[in-house]
Amino acid sequence: MRELCLIAEDTNQYGADLGADAPRLGALLDALEGMDGLRWVRLLYCFPSYFSQELVDAIARCKKVCRCIDVPLQHTSPSVLKRMRRPDREHTMKLLHRLQDTVEGLTFRSTFISGFPGETEEEHVQLLEDVSGGSGLCIIRGGGFPYSEEAGTSAADMDLAVPKERRLMRNAEVEQEFAVIRETWAEEAVGKEFDVMIDRMDGSEAVGRTEFDAPELDGEVKIPGALLPMQPGTMLKVRIVAADGTDLVGEVLGEA
């Protein structure tokens, strides 16, 4: 096994059902750090409520943890988060900045809901500004989806419903902002070197990912002209020579 994706309804709550003395996610990361052959541990769907200092420290010291953590923020407006019954903005921003300050090179992927009941144009604009880096957070991957009523939820009974057409329009603006972020990141990657994990062969072209790209969700690194077929899981040191939209094109420097 070369890559392990850890995902749950709230991945940070690992071990919470086993009692106060049970190992938690930080201990699991320490154990995985010593596993032979494993190169990447990818943290997906880590809810911002349960990042203990012990977990932050474990992420910092475990070099196999990919430096792009998935934290589903849903929104950044204080009033929208309150209506969503999500952690408040101040708590979340302090936490994510602490993570960035503690873990060298850390970035985030996230998802956001557009058109939640009562969302104003000003709150939507604030979300766009935060996604684009206005909050100082390094969010380089992610996307959005329009709010959809679910029977039996408190939100479905709220007043001030946002018209469906406006939800779709706002979601499209969030997605466009992420497209710009991904393209900018790809352009800035040209000339840099990355460890790349190969996923598959496409003819004579090897296709893989950096640690910042979750499988089947994010971008790819294309390596044309492979002399020999490469097995999935092969790790290579690659120099990026071009950006292809949100994907990268690289040349092999050697094994990683």
Image (tube, helix red, strand yellow):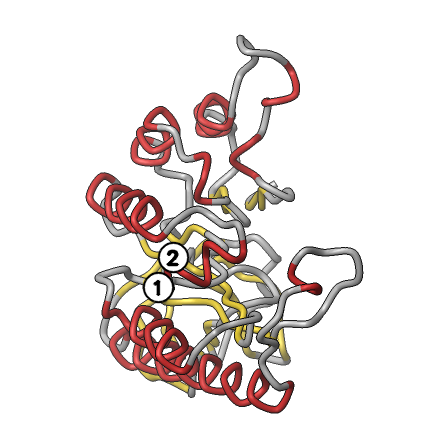
Looking at the image, the residue that sits furthest to the front is: 159
Quick one: 141 or 208, which is closer to the camera?
Answer: 141
Q: How many marks?
A: 2
Q: Does 187 sit left or right of 20 as displayed?
A: left
Q: Does 94 sit left or right of 236 as displayed?
A: left
Label 1 CA crowd tier, 10 Å (few <14, some 14–19, many 20+): many
Amino acid beneath label 2: Phe
Against 115, residue 235 (above or below) is above
Q: Does 147 sit left or right of 112 as displayed?
A: right
Q: Secondary structure at mark 1?
A: strand
Give x and y (percent) for residue 92: 35, 48
Quarter in which the N terminus is drawn = top right
The first of marks 2 and 1 along the sequence is 2
Q: Quadrant of residue 107?
A: bottom left
Against 14, residue 251 (above or below) is below
Give x and y (percent) for residue 116: 56, 70
Residue 229, numbered circle: none
Quick one: 95 or 254, which is closer to the camera?
Answer: 95
Q: Quadrant of residue 167?
A: bottom right
Q: Residue at x 57, y 71 (%)?
A: 117
Quick one: 28 or 129, which is closer to the camera?
Answer: 129
Contact between labelled residues 1 and 2, with CB atoms less than 8 Å apart: yes
Q: Residue at x 53, y 50 (%)?
A: 85
What is the spatial separation of the Cα atoms under label 2 and label 1, in whole angstroms? Answer: 5 Å
Query: Which residue, given by chain and number where applicable, does mark 2 sit on?
Result: 108
Q: Secondary structure at mark 2?
A: strand
Q: Residue at x 53, y 8 (%)?
A: 21
Residue 139, numbered circle: 1
Q: Residue at x 34, y 33 (%)?
A: 56
Amino acid beneath label 1: Ile
